[in-house]
Amino acid sequence: MYATLASRQAHGSLLDRILSRLILLAKLRQTNSQVYGLLKILMRRYPVWNVLRDDPYDSLIDALLAGRGLTRAELQVGPEALHPPEQMQDMATAVARLERAVRTREKIVVYGDYDVDGVCSTAVLMDFLERVGADCDCLLPDRHKDGYGLKPPGVERAIAKGARVIVTVDNGISAYDALALAEMRGVEVVVVDHHQQLAELPRALAIINPNRRDCTYPFKDLAGVGVTFKLVQALSTAFLAGEERRRYLNELLDLVALGTVADLVPVLGENRLFIQRGLQILQHTKRLGLCALKKVASYRDQPLDAASLGFRLGPRINVAGRLKTPDIALRLLRSTSEGEAAQLADELNRLNSQRQAWQREGIQEVEEQVGPEEDMEDHIIVVRGEWNLGIIGLLASKLCEKYARPAVVCTQSSDHGLCVGSARSIPGYDISAGIHSCEEHLKAHGGHPAAAGFSLEADAFEHFRLALIGHANTHISAEELQPALDVDLMLKPADLTMDTVEQLAALEPFGNGHRRPVFALEDCRVVWARQIGSGRHFKAELEVGGRRCAALWWNQKDLADQVRPGDRLSAAFELEADTYTGNGAVQMVLKDLYLREPVA
């Protein structure tokens, strides 16, 4: 049964190239439309399906988790998953200094970041400092004017606010010049960050970061807001006690969950507990800004899950820093007025619609610059153009997803002719390390193995591009560029039921490190197929093993002209409840199709 899948794994790349040429000939010579359609199906999205478990199973959940190397115990986390914050390097030093600053009314300025993680981190720390009566204020960088992280002008702005102590959240691990200036000006800095340490640590009073090389904290995958929460957790013992402290820390988890999900860190360990409990808090949150945000995102009393945060709420927070200023989002999260919260949420909703339109235009432009996939020789995409700075990371993500290789998108900044770039990567290639290897051409850089950012002089771009391409071509094999879909297991047709959907719901939250399960079925017969959603999407009914099931593929309208009743397909899909019909049925949310037997 699995010979087809194995064959695709062995010959996918060559087959893709041959079929691409055949399709081009078909277009040019206007050959039979059915042949052209069948060729398109043959080279659907993924030439390789990596089936993690293809043997018969008794328990679907046990087989699923075994294929991922996970256990039920790892997913059923409780308070025991939390590690003492004091295990982080420099935590005791930071707590002592901040406690003294609060009690002596020294001005504390929190310096955050413009993304969801940074905004939520700022909101968490400011909420606590205000609760305990600190003299405090906050600053967020402007993506378009300031760029990422604390820089010398940011230190000057904090000093102008009277800062005696600066606390960076979700940044600071590479702020060498800024921290040197702060030291020279007699201002102490506590760095609270989670980004990788790529060089020697900068000089600061304390650097709290589980990813600093000498930190023995056992969980390394916290988001910036998670590290910020650990600081608040440790510092709160000096100001809050007993039930009041427990209740207050619990109430912060709506912000912690939002920042954690949006930053795409693994949904395991401490993060898993933060998200699970945070979703419960967020469902009934008293924060007026989050209530207003849920309303404009069409969530009121509906159950929230990690996808709700990642795809509905998070982008509306993120868009403030992308298109305007992150202060809009921070004001929303900290709002104490229903009217103000509603106004800010509406503004973010409008900005998000604008971002979506710009993103669609940008994708068309950048794909034209990249050119045909079959002509690609380099193992990384590096492009430069005139795009809004706020969407270049989104463009890089789309390129990375479509072409199955790391992608870097640069645009001209308004800051003295600098180019600013954003990068996304594939598994197996550390894009942050790749960019770091080209640092001689850069003004600043930082990030994670999967995503990074940088800036450089415009006339250094070509040198940087060639250096990064050379690094990627050396460190990425041709096999790693094969678009591959991880399939958890070959599903029994008898498991196309709501009972399976309910069992999977018990494995929530899904996300990075524990994604939503993907199943596959072979020999599915097409009963009918058509376009839906004003002609944008593909929907079909498939029959397999005597069972019929609806199948939906978003934004794949052209398939309706290519898939015909009676065709036999292999399908890879996620399984969910069919909420549209409301009759307790399930549907496949398609990830790929593979033609087995076309109708003559």
Image: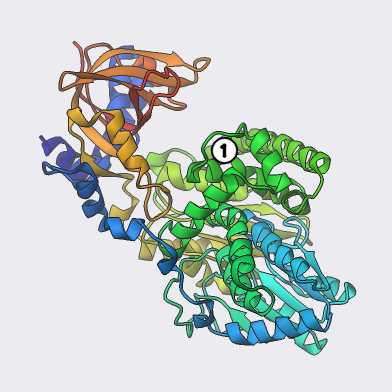
- The answer to which quarter of the image holds residue 18 is top left
Q: Is residue 586 above or below residue 257?
A: above
Judged left or right of residue 255, residue 408 is left
- Measured as percent of width and height from the top left, residue 251 is found at 62, 57
What secondary structure is found at the residue carrying circle 1?
A: helix
On screen, residue 467 above or below 596 = below
Residue 68 visible in the snapshot: yes
Q: Position of residue 93 (x, y in %)?
A: 63, 87
Q: Quadrant of the N terminus?
A: top left
Q: In screen coordinates, is 223 left or right of 2?
A: right
Q: Quadrant of the C terminus?
A: top left
Hey, which quadrant is residue 192 in on the image?
bottom right
Q: Position of residue 123 (x, y in %)?
A: 70, 60
Taking 231 as reference, is 226 above or below it?
A: above
x, y percentage for residue 133?
80, 71
| Residue depicted at 30% across the width and 40% down the height | 503
Q: Residues within 10 Å of mark 1 (few under 14, many from 20)?
A: some
Q: Amino acid at mark 1?
A: Ile
* Extreme residue toward the front, this view: 243
**Residue at position x 32%, y 54% in the image:** 480
The answer to whether residue 17 shows anywhere in this view is no
The residue lying at 11 percent from left, 38 percent from top is 3
Q: Is residue 511 above or below residue 215?
A: above
Q: Identify the residue under disc 1.
A: 363
Please give the name of the residue rendered at 43% of the width and 56% of the height, measured from the top-left corner: 267
